Image (cartoon, grey):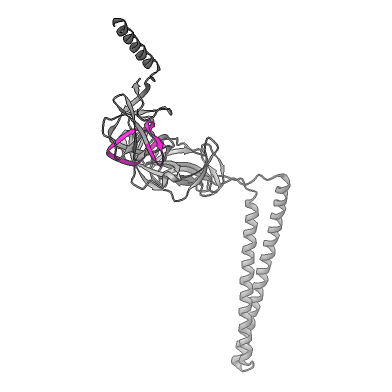
Amino acid sequence: MKRKVLIGIVSLLLLALLGWAFMPTPAEVEIAAVTQGRFERSVQEDGKTRLRDRYVVSAPLAGRVARILLKQGDTVMRDAPVATFWPVAPALLDERTRAEQSARIGAMQASVARAQANVGRAGAALDQAQAELKRSEALAQQGFVSPNQNETGRLAVRLREKELESARQEEAAARHELEQSRVALRQFSQITPDGRQRAYEVKAPVSGKVLKVLQQSEGIVMAGTPIMELGDPTQLEVVVDILTEDAAQIKPGTAVQLSNWGGPDVLTGQVRLIEPAAFTKVSALGVEEQRVNAIIDITSAPEKWQALGDGFKVDVRVLVQVVENAVMIPVSALFPVGARSGLFVLDKGHARLQEIEVAARNGALAWVKTGLAKDTQVIVYPDTKLKDGDRVKTR
Protein backbone atom coordinates (compact mmCIF):
# COMPACT_ATOMS: atom_id res chain seq x y z
CA MET A 1 0.00 0.00 0.00
CA LYS A 2 2.79 2.38 0.86
CA ARG A 3 4.46 1.58 -2.40
CA LYS A 4 1.32 2.47 -4.37
CA VAL A 5 0.97 5.78 -2.57
CA LEU A 6 4.60 6.64 -3.24
CA ILE A 7 4.21 5.82 -6.91
CA GLY A 8 1.09 8.03 -7.11
CA ILE A 9 2.86 10.95 -5.47
CA VAL A 10 5.80 10.63 -7.84
CA SER A 11 3.43 10.47 -10.82
CA LEU A 12 1.63 13.60 -9.69
CA LEU A 13 4.93 15.42 -9.31
CA LEU A 14 6.01 14.34 -12.76
CA LEU A 15 2.71 15.51 -14.24
CA ALA A 16 3.03 18.87 -12.45
CA LEU A 17 6.59 19.23 -13.64
CA LEU A 18 5.56 18.46 -17.23
CA GLY A 19 2.67 20.96 -17.03
CA TRP A 20 4.94 23.65 -15.67
CA ALA A 21 7.53 22.94 -18.40
CA PHE A 22 5.02 23.26 -21.22
CA MET A 23 3.13 26.19 -19.73
CA PRO A 24 3.73 29.42 -21.84
CA THR A 25 5.87 31.98 -20.07
CA PRO A 26 4.38 35.44 -19.42
CA ALA A 27 5.26 38.02 -22.08
CA GLU A 28 7.39 40.93 -20.96
CA VAL A 29 5.68 44.26 -21.59
CA GLU A 30 6.14 47.96 -20.91
CA ILE A 31 3.39 49.77 -19.15
CA ALA A 32 2.31 53.36 -18.69
CA ALA A 33 -0.35 55.00 -16.56
CA VAL A 34 -3.41 56.86 -17.78
CA THR A 35 -3.04 60.54 -16.88
CA GLN A 36 -5.38 63.48 -16.62
CA GLY A 37 -4.40 67.07 -17.37
CA ARG A 38 -3.95 69.60 -20.14
CA PHE A 39 -4.08 68.15 -23.64
CA GLU A 40 -2.51 70.19 -26.44
CA ARG A 41 -2.61 69.50 -30.16
CA SER A 42 -0.26 71.75 -32.06
CA VAL A 43 1.34 72.47 -35.41
CA GLN A 44 5.11 72.81 -35.21
CA GLU A 45 7.23 74.48 -37.89
CA ASP A 46 10.36 76.60 -38.23
CA GLY A 47 9.72 80.32 -38.59
CA LYS A 48 11.71 83.51 -38.71
CA THR A 49 11.30 87.05 -37.46
CA ARG A 50 10.89 90.07 -39.67
CA LEU A 51 10.21 93.75 -39.25
CA ARG A 52 6.58 94.69 -39.43
CA ASP A 53 7.44 97.74 -41.55
CA ARG A 54 10.60 97.94 -43.66
CA TYR A 55 11.57 101.07 -45.60
CA VAL A 56 13.97 101.01 -48.56
CA VAL A 57 15.53 104.43 -49.24
CA SER A 58 16.16 104.74 -52.99
CA ALA A 59 17.84 107.32 -55.18
CA PRO A 60 15.15 109.83 -56.25
CA LEU A 61 17.21 110.87 -59.28
CA ALA A 62 20.33 109.90 -61.18
CA GLY A 63 23.48 111.46 -59.81
CA ARG A 64 26.67 111.02 -57.83
CA VAL A 65 25.98 109.94 -54.25
CA ALA A 66 28.40 110.84 -51.48
CA ARG A 67 29.87 108.14 -49.26
CA ILE A 68 27.32 106.95 -46.71
CA LEU A 69 28.71 107.54 -43.22
CA LEU A 70 25.89 105.69 -41.43
CA LYS A 71 26.53 102.12 -40.29
CA GLN A 72 24.20 99.21 -39.63
CA GLY A 73 22.54 99.70 -36.26
CA ASP A 74 22.83 103.50 -36.23
CA THR A 75 19.74 105.38 -35.09
CA VAL A 76 18.21 107.95 -37.42
CA MET A 77 15.36 110.38 -36.87
CA ARG A 78 12.58 111.22 -39.28
CA ASP A 79 13.55 113.84 -41.91
CA ALA A 80 17.25 113.56 -40.97
CA PRO A 81 19.62 113.60 -44.01
CA VAL A 82 20.87 110.11 -44.81
CA ALA A 83 22.45 110.66 -48.25
CA THR A 84 23.72 113.54 -50.40
CA PHE A 85 23.51 113.67 -54.21
CA TRP A 86 25.47 115.81 -56.64
CA PRO A 87 24.94 116.36 -60.35
CA VAL A 88 26.69 113.96 -62.67
CA ALA A 89 29.71 115.46 -64.48
CA PRO A 90 29.31 115.65 -68.28
CA ALA A 91 31.23 113.34 -70.55
CA LEU A 92 34.81 114.32 -71.44
CA LEU A 93 35.32 115.94 -74.86
CA ASP A 94 37.89 114.49 -77.26
CA GLU A 95 39.79 116.67 -79.75
CA ARG A 96 37.38 116.03 -82.60
CA THR A 97 34.32 116.90 -80.52
CA ARG A 98 36.04 120.01 -79.17
CA ALA A 99 36.88 121.17 -82.72
CA GLU A 100 33.30 120.55 -83.85
CA GLN A 101 32.02 122.53 -80.87
CA SER A 102 34.37 125.43 -81.66
CA ALA A 103 33.14 125.48 -85.26
CA ARG A 104 29.55 125.44 -84.01
CA ILE A 105 30.33 128.50 -81.87
CA GLY A 106 31.57 130.33 -84.97
CA ALA A 107 28.35 129.46 -86.79
CA MET A 108 26.30 130.73 -83.83
CA GLN A 109 28.25 134.01 -83.83
CA ALA A 110 27.42 134.45 -87.52
CA SER A 111 23.76 133.76 -86.75
CA VAL A 112 23.80 136.45 -84.09
CA ALA A 113 25.30 138.93 -86.54
CA ARG A 114 22.67 138.04 -89.15
CA ALA A 115 19.91 138.46 -86.57
CA GLN A 116 21.29 141.90 -85.63
CA ALA A 117 21.26 142.91 -89.28
CA ASN A 118 17.65 141.81 -89.58
CA VAL A 119 16.78 143.88 -86.52
CA GLY A 120 18.38 146.92 -88.10
CA ARG A 121 16.54 146.39 -91.39
CA ALA A 122 13.22 145.93 -89.60
CA GLY A 123 13.86 149.11 -87.58
CA ALA A 124 14.59 151.11 -90.78
CA ALA A 125 11.42 149.78 -92.41
CA LEU A 126 9.43 150.82 -89.36
CA ASP A 127 10.90 154.36 -89.47
CA GLN A 128 10.02 154.64 -93.13
CA ALA A 129 6.43 153.48 -92.52
CA GLN A 130 5.98 155.95 -89.68
CA ALA A 131 7.31 158.81 -91.80
CA GLU A 132 4.97 157.97 -94.66
CA LEU A 133 2.06 157.80 -92.25
CA LYS A 134 2.83 161.30 -90.94
CA ARG A 135 2.97 162.76 -94.47
CA SER A 136 -0.27 161.01 -95.35
CA GLU A 137 -2.02 162.38 -92.27
CA ALA A 138 -0.82 165.92 -93.04
CA LEU A 139 -2.11 165.70 -96.64
CA ALA A 140 -5.40 164.24 -95.37
CA GLN A 141 -5.92 167.28 -93.16
CA GLN A 142 -5.46 169.52 -96.22
CA GLY A 143 -7.91 167.39 -98.21
CA PHE A 144 -5.40 166.05 -100.73
CA VAL A 145 -5.54 162.37 -99.51
CA SER A 146 -8.58 160.22 -98.75
CA PRO A 147 -9.07 158.81 -95.22
CA ASN A 148 -8.74 155.23 -96.59
CA GLN A 149 -5.14 155.88 -97.52
CA ASN A 150 -4.36 156.87 -93.90
CA GLU A 151 -5.81 153.56 -92.71
CA THR A 152 -3.47 151.69 -95.07
CA GLY A 153 -0.53 153.62 -93.65
CA ARG A 154 -1.44 152.75 -90.08
CA LEU A 155 -1.69 149.04 -90.97
CA ALA A 156 1.75 149.24 -92.61
CA VAL A 157 3.22 150.70 -89.39
CA ARG A 158 1.74 147.84 -87.30
CA LEU A 159 3.17 145.29 -89.74
CA ARG A 160 6.63 146.82 -89.52
CA GLU A 161 6.42 146.83 -85.69
CA LYS A 162 5.68 143.11 -85.68
CA GLU A 163 8.54 142.44 -88.08
CA LEU A 164 10.89 144.34 -85.77
CA GLU A 165 9.67 142.35 -82.74
CA SER A 166 10.17 139.07 -84.61
CA ALA A 167 13.71 140.07 -85.61
CA ARG A 168 14.57 140.93 -82.01
CA GLN A 169 13.26 137.51 -80.84
CA GLU A 170 15.40 135.79 -83.47
CA GLU A 171 18.41 137.74 -82.22
CA ALA A 172 17.72 136.66 -78.62
CA ALA A 173 17.38 133.03 -79.70
CA ALA A 174 20.66 133.20 -81.61
CA ARG A 175 22.42 134.67 -78.55
CA HIS A 176 21.08 131.85 -76.34
CA GLU A 177 22.23 129.20 -78.81
CA LEU A 178 25.65 130.83 -78.87
CA GLU A 179 25.81 130.75 -75.06
CA GLN A 180 24.70 127.12 -75.08
CA SER A 181 27.53 126.20 -77.42
CA ARG A 182 30.04 128.04 -75.22
CA VAL A 183 28.80 126.22 -72.07
CA ALA A 184 29.71 122.87 -73.61
CA LEU A 185 33.38 123.94 -73.64
CA ARG A 186 33.48 125.23 -70.06
CA GLN A 187 35.13 123.35 -67.20
CA PHE A 188 32.54 121.48 -65.05
CA SER A 189 32.44 122.46 -61.38
CA GLN A 190 30.28 121.45 -58.41
CA ILE A 191 30.59 125.00 -57.04
CA THR A 192 28.00 127.57 -58.04
CA PRO A 193 29.02 131.23 -58.73
CA ASP A 194 27.93 132.22 -55.21
CA GLY A 195 30.33 129.67 -53.68
CA ARG A 196 27.77 127.05 -52.62
CA GLN A 197 27.91 123.42 -53.66
CA ARG A 198 25.11 121.99 -55.77
CA ALA A 199 23.70 119.18 -53.62
CA TYR A 200 20.43 117.32 -53.04
CA GLU A 201 19.80 115.67 -49.67
CA VAL A 202 17.75 112.49 -49.21
CA LYS A 203 15.96 112.41 -45.85
CA ALA A 204 14.84 109.50 -43.68
CA PRO A 205 11.14 108.69 -44.16
CA VAL A 206 10.74 107.37 -40.57
CA SER A 207 12.57 107.20 -37.27
CA GLY A 208 14.35 103.93 -36.65
CA LYS A 209 17.64 102.14 -37.17
CA VAL A 210 19.75 101.40 -40.21
CA LEU A 211 19.26 97.75 -41.15
CA LYS A 212 21.44 97.56 -44.25
CA VAL A 213 23.62 99.98 -46.21
CA LEU A 214 23.35 98.91 -49.84
CA GLN A 215 25.48 101.74 -51.34
CA GLN A 216 28.34 102.45 -48.95
CA SER A 217 30.91 104.11 -51.19
CA GLU A 218 30.62 107.25 -53.31
CA GLY A 219 29.59 106.55 -56.87
CA ILE A 220 27.21 107.17 -59.75
CA VAL A 221 23.74 105.68 -59.25
CA MET A 222 20.63 105.64 -61.39
CA ALA A 223 17.21 106.81 -60.25
CA GLY A 224 15.51 104.14 -58.14
CA THR A 225 18.75 102.46 -56.96
CA PRO A 226 18.33 101.18 -53.34
CA ILE A 227 20.70 102.96 -50.96
CA MET A 228 19.77 101.65 -47.51
CA GLU A 229 17.05 99.93 -45.50
CA LEU A 230 15.48 101.47 -42.40
CA GLY A 231 13.14 100.04 -39.79
CA ASP A 232 12.18 99.84 -36.13
CA PRO A 233 13.65 96.60 -34.63
CA THR A 234 11.26 96.79 -31.67
CA GLN A 235 8.33 96.16 -34.05
CA LEU A 236 8.90 92.48 -34.90
CA GLU A 237 6.58 89.77 -36.13
CA VAL A 238 7.09 86.09 -36.94
CA VAL A 239 6.28 84.55 -40.30
CA VAL A 240 6.01 80.78 -40.70
CA ASP A 241 4.88 78.72 -43.68
CA ILE A 242 2.56 75.83 -42.76
CA LEU A 243 0.69 73.19 -44.71
CA THR A 244 -2.65 74.35 -46.03
CA GLU A 245 -4.49 71.46 -44.33
CA ASP A 246 -3.07 72.63 -40.99
CA ALA A 247 -3.78 76.28 -41.77
CA ALA A 248 -7.46 75.46 -42.24
CA GLN A 249 -7.63 74.64 -38.51
CA ILE A 250 -5.94 77.85 -37.38
CA LYS A 251 -7.87 81.06 -36.77
CA PRO A 252 -6.67 84.57 -35.93
CA GLY A 253 -6.04 84.83 -32.19
CA THR A 254 -4.78 81.24 -31.81
CA ALA A 255 -2.11 80.97 -29.10
CA VAL A 256 1.49 80.35 -30.17
CA GLN A 257 4.67 79.34 -28.32
CA LEU A 258 8.08 80.47 -29.63
CA SER A 259 11.17 78.54 -28.52
CA ASN A 260 14.80 77.88 -29.47
CA TRP A 261 15.32 81.49 -30.49
CA GLY A 262 18.47 81.90 -28.40
CA GLY A 263 17.00 83.07 -25.11
CA PRO A 264 16.12 81.07 -21.98
CA ASP A 265 12.38 81.83 -22.04
CA VAL A 266 9.61 80.43 -24.20
CA LEU A 267 7.91 83.42 -25.75
CA THR A 268 4.18 83.66 -26.28
CA GLY A 269 2.34 85.03 -29.26
CA GLN A 270 -0.85 84.81 -31.23
CA VAL A 271 -1.77 84.40 -34.88
CA ARG A 272 -2.71 87.71 -36.47
CA LEU A 273 -3.27 86.64 -40.05
CA ILE A 274 -3.35 83.63 -42.35
CA GLU A 275 -2.44 84.92 -45.79
CA PRO A 276 -5.17 84.25 -48.36
CA ALA A 277 -2.86 82.92 -51.09
CA ALA A 278 -0.85 79.70 -50.81
CA PHE A 279 2.28 78.68 -52.71
CA THR A 280 4.07 75.49 -53.73
CA LYS A 281 7.21 74.48 -51.86
CA VAL A 282 9.43 71.45 -52.39
CA SER A 283 10.29 69.65 -49.16
CA ALA A 284 13.67 68.17 -48.25
CA LEU A 285 12.41 64.82 -49.55
CA GLY A 286 11.55 66.30 -52.93
CA VAL A 287 7.78 66.33 -52.36
CA GLU A 288 5.75 69.29 -53.58
CA GLU A 289 3.66 70.79 -50.76
CA GLN A 290 1.05 73.50 -50.69
CA ARG A 291 1.91 75.95 -47.95
CA VAL A 292 0.67 79.32 -46.75
CA ASN A 293 2.25 81.99 -44.54
CA ALA A 294 0.95 82.63 -41.04
CA ILE A 295 1.80 85.99 -39.44
CA ILE A 296 2.31 85.92 -35.66
CA ASP A 297 2.50 88.79 -33.18
CA ILE A 298 4.82 88.41 -30.16
CA THR A 299 2.80 89.07 -27.00
CA SER A 300 5.59 88.53 -24.45
CA ALA A 301 7.04 91.60 -22.75
CA PRO A 302 9.57 93.34 -25.06
CA GLU A 303 12.32 93.16 -22.42
CA LYS A 304 12.27 89.36 -22.72
CA TRP A 305 13.18 89.35 -26.42
CA GLN A 306 15.45 92.38 -26.80
CA ALA A 307 18.11 90.10 -28.30
CA LEU A 308 15.84 89.17 -31.21
CA GLY A 309 16.51 90.83 -34.53
CA ASP A 310 15.28 90.81 -38.08
CA GLY A 311 15.53 87.41 -39.80
CA PHE A 312 16.19 85.35 -36.63
CA LYS A 313 15.15 81.69 -36.62
CA VAL A 314 12.53 80.49 -34.09
CA ASP A 315 10.65 77.26 -33.45
CA VAL A 316 6.93 77.95 -33.76
CA ARG A 317 4.30 75.84 -31.98
CA VAL A 318 0.73 76.80 -32.85
CA LEU A 319 -1.76 75.44 -30.29
CA VAL A 320 -4.60 74.27 -32.52
CA GLN A 321 -6.54 72.53 -29.71
CA VAL A 322 -6.28 72.85 -25.92
CA VAL A 323 -8.41 70.77 -23.51
CA GLU A 324 -8.17 71.01 -19.72
CA ASN A 325 -8.62 67.94 -17.45
CA ALA A 326 -8.45 65.56 -20.39
CA VAL A 327 -7.86 61.81 -19.91
CA MET A 328 -4.72 60.96 -21.87
CA ILE A 329 -2.80 57.83 -22.82
CA PRO A 330 0.43 57.38 -24.81
CA VAL A 331 -0.13 57.07 -28.53
CA SER A 332 2.20 54.07 -28.50
CA ALA A 333 -0.48 52.05 -26.63
CA LEU A 334 -3.04 52.33 -29.42
CA PHE A 335 -3.64 50.03 -32.36
CA PRO A 336 -6.55 49.75 -34.80
CA VAL A 337 -9.46 47.44 -34.01
CA GLY A 338 -11.80 47.64 -36.96
CA ALA A 339 -13.05 51.20 -37.28
CA ARG A 340 -12.11 52.05 -33.70
CA SER A 341 -8.94 52.04 -31.60
CA GLY A 342 -7.94 49.47 -29.02
CA LEU A 343 -5.38 48.91 -26.29
CA PHE A 344 -4.40 46.34 -23.65
CA VAL A 345 -5.11 47.08 -20.01
CA LEU A 346 -3.00 45.35 -17.35
CA ASP A 347 -5.36 43.34 -15.09
CA LYS A 348 -3.77 41.15 -12.39
CA GLY A 349 -0.96 39.93 -14.61
CA HIS A 350 -3.14 39.50 -17.69
CA ALA A 351 -3.61 41.66 -20.79
CA ARG A 352 -7.24 42.68 -21.33
CA LEU A 353 -8.24 44.03 -24.72
CA GLN A 354 -10.37 47.16 -24.53
CA GLU A 355 -11.85 49.27 -27.32
CA ILE A 356 -11.91 53.03 -26.76
CA GLU A 357 -12.94 56.22 -28.50
CA VAL A 358 -10.07 58.62 -29.27
CA ALA A 359 -11.17 62.25 -29.55
CA ALA A 360 -7.82 63.68 -30.70
CA ARG A 361 -4.12 62.94 -30.62
CA ASN A 362 -0.79 64.69 -30.92
CA GLY A 363 2.66 63.30 -31.43
CA ALA A 364 2.90 61.71 -27.96
CA LEU A 365 -0.53 61.57 -26.29
CA ALA A 366 -4.10 60.72 -27.23
CA TRP A 367 -7.20 62.24 -25.66
CA VAL A 368 -9.73 59.57 -24.65
CA LYS A 369 -13.26 60.74 -23.91
CA THR A 370 -14.66 57.61 -22.22
CA GLY A 371 -13.70 54.09 -21.19
CA LEU A 372 -10.60 54.67 -19.05
CA ALA A 373 -9.99 55.90 -15.53
CA LYS A 374 -7.03 57.84 -14.26
CA ASP A 375 -3.96 55.78 -13.17
CA THR A 376 -5.10 52.72 -15.16
CA GLN A 377 -2.09 50.70 -16.31
CA VAL A 378 -1.94 50.21 -20.09
CA ILE A 379 0.57 48.31 -22.20
CA VAL A 380 2.66 50.41 -24.59
CA TYR A 381 4.29 49.05 -27.72
CA PRO A 382 2.28 45.78 -27.53
CA ASP A 383 3.58 42.79 -29.47
CA THR A 384 1.51 41.75 -32.48
CA LYS A 385 1.26 38.22 -30.99
CA LEU A 386 -0.27 39.46 -27.73
CA LYS A 387 -3.90 38.41 -27.30
CA ASP A 388 -6.70 39.13 -24.90
CA GLY A 389 -6.17 37.26 -21.60
CA ASP A 390 -2.47 36.43 -22.12
CA ARG A 391 -0.28 36.42 -19.07
CA VAL A 392 2.21 39.29 -18.98
CA LYS A 393 4.83 40.68 -16.71
CA THR A 394 6.39 44.12 -16.61
CA ARG A 395 9.99 44.65 -17.54
Residue 42 coordinates in the image, percent (x, y)? 37, 39
Q: Report the quarter where the N terminus lies.
A: top left
Residues drawn in magenta: 315-341
Question: Residue shown at 66%/72% (left/top)?
Answer: 122
Residue 18 spot, x, y in % from top left: 38, 14
In the displayed orientation, state which residue is furthest to the bottom. 143
Q: Nearer the viewer, residue 216 or 314?
A: 314
Q: Quadrant of the C terminus?
A: top left
Q: Main secondary structure of the magenta part?
A: strand
Up-down: is 221 above or below 11? below
Q: In this view, which residue lies farthest toward the top?
A: 3
Residue occupying the point 56% across, 46% down: 222
Residue 214 in the magenta stretch? The answer is no
Q: Is residue 91 in sight in this rendering?
A: yes
Asked whether the viewer can see residue 199, the reply is: no
**Observer-nearest residue: 30 or 105?**
30
Q: Is residue 9 left or right of 248 when viewed as pictured?
A: left
Measured along the vertical axis of the image, is residue 47 above or below residue 278? above
Residue beneath the point at 41% across and 37% down:
336
**Magenta stretch: includes residue 324:** yes
In the rendered image, residue 77, in percent from the top left (x then y), is placed at 38, 43
The quarter of the displayed image where residue 377 is located: top left
